[in-house]
Amino acid sequence: MNTTLRRALGAAAVAALALPALAACGSSGGSKESDGGKTVTLVSHDSFVASKQVLDEFTKETGYKVSVLKSGDAGRAVNQAILSKSHPQGDVFFGVDNTLLSRALDNGIFASYEAKGLDRVPKDLQLDAGEHRVTPVDTGDICVNYDRAYFADHKLDPPKTLDDLVKPEYKGLLVTENSATSSPGLAFQLATVAKYGDEGWQDYWKKLKENGVEVVDGWEQAYNNRFSGSAAGRKAKGDRPLVVSYASSPPAEVLDMKDKPKEGPTGVATGTCFRQTEFAGLLKGAKNAEGGKALLDFLLSRKFQEDMPLSMFVKPVNPDAKLPEVFTAYGAKVDSPWTLAPEKIAKNRDQWVKAWSSLVLK
């Protein structure tokens, strides 16, 4: 996978949700004592990317330098933050999304702080508005992507909705990720729960299984190996023209092209999308709490928010932030994504994943 596409399609792409026990980490984080507390440590998943220019701007404005400590994929990073909560590794944690938020909040890893600029963020994204333990930073949509060339060559309309995916004409075309080991896989499962309800989602997956859906462990394998529409997938001779990925995958595919095409090689079935929101929070017990608060304020600033789309290929939550042209020209506009209340996810996530695994993987 090339560096650009790794950055572009990061944002918790392969979050491991079924994790082995990890040893609790010792106290090694927070601000560096040697620089008089002028370093603020941001703990995140491996897909966090910010330009040097924007981080330098934070230093110029506040006097704090940012040290980024990456802790694996999103699920592992959250799990490690929980296990090390008595001796936090840093000052701020970035990258817990709405599918995993309850796990972090229930384990009390965050301190309350209302970031400057939060009043500009849409209310529906402020999932902890009462206590301000976390701050929404970005949003993205997990959606079925399709290989335009395949469907044109076969004179077949690409699917648009979840209902379409179980139709005979799409038999054997879809690859998705394991809900137990992948954040996109879990989000796709949650989309089906949101659409078909507690009583109907399992019947839907029975039909999807009968229609030849392929399940792989994570996003990298699905998008870069099995999917026929991505640059990496074509090189790997992938033969699945439908894949669970991101609404931002199409602009990522054209980003490095010298001559931009009229439309990207991949498209998005917008009726299949599940909305994810990523949050950041001040870690309870942070050594540099003041620096952490300054960083949270900066994450909502227009400067940082406008840096994210071409760094992590996610959308800003600050309504004043402008999207780059490649993002708007090639990205899919998802007006009505599937969503679920965080408390419902918290209550049912583990049993849903267990039921899905028993149904689909056996």
Image: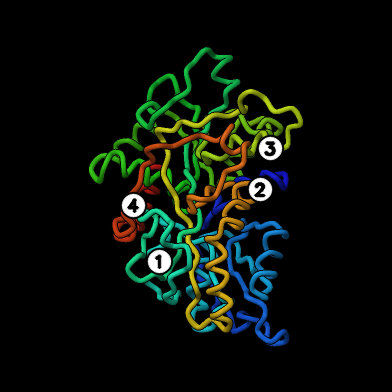
Q: Which residue is mark 2?
A: 6
| Residue 209 percent location from the top left of the image | 40, 34
**Residue 67 visible in the snapshot:** no
Q: Is residue 152 left or right of residue 197?
A: right
Label 1 SS: helix
Q: Residue furthest top?
A: 155
Q: Are marks 1 and 3 in contact (CB under 8 Å)?
A: no
| Residue 117 percent location from the top left of the image | 47, 63
Which residue: 44% across, 77% down? Answer: 111
Could you give the CA–CA distance between mark 2 and mark 1, rounded to whole angstroms? 26 Å
Q: Give the mark nearer the N terminus: 1 vs 3.
A: 1
Q: Give the mark nearer the N terminus: 3 vs 2.
A: 2
Q: Are marks 4 and 2 in contact (CB under 8 Å)?
A: no
Q: Which residue is mark 3?
A: 255
Q: Which residue is mark 4?
A: 352
Q: Are marks 3 and 2 in contact (CB under 8 Å)?
A: no
Which residue: 44% across, 33% down? Answer: 270
Q: Which residue is mark 1?
A: 103
Which residue: 50% across, 27% down? Answer: 173
- Label 4 neighbourhood size at 10 Å, few (<14), some (14-19), many (20+)? many
Q: Is residue 299 left or right of residue 120?
A: right
Label 3 SS: loop
* Count of numbered circles in the view: 4
| Residue 296 percent location from the top left of the image | 53, 68
Q: Give the mark nearer the N terminus: 4 vs 1.
A: 1
Foreground label between 4 and 3: 3
Q: Residue furthest right?
A: 258
Residue 247 is labelled as none
User: For the residue marked with disc 3, what is the amino acid?
Assistant: Leu
Q: Give the mark nearer the N terminus: 4 vs 3.
A: 3
Could you give the CA–CA distance between mark 3 and mark 2, rounded to whole angstroms? 12 Å
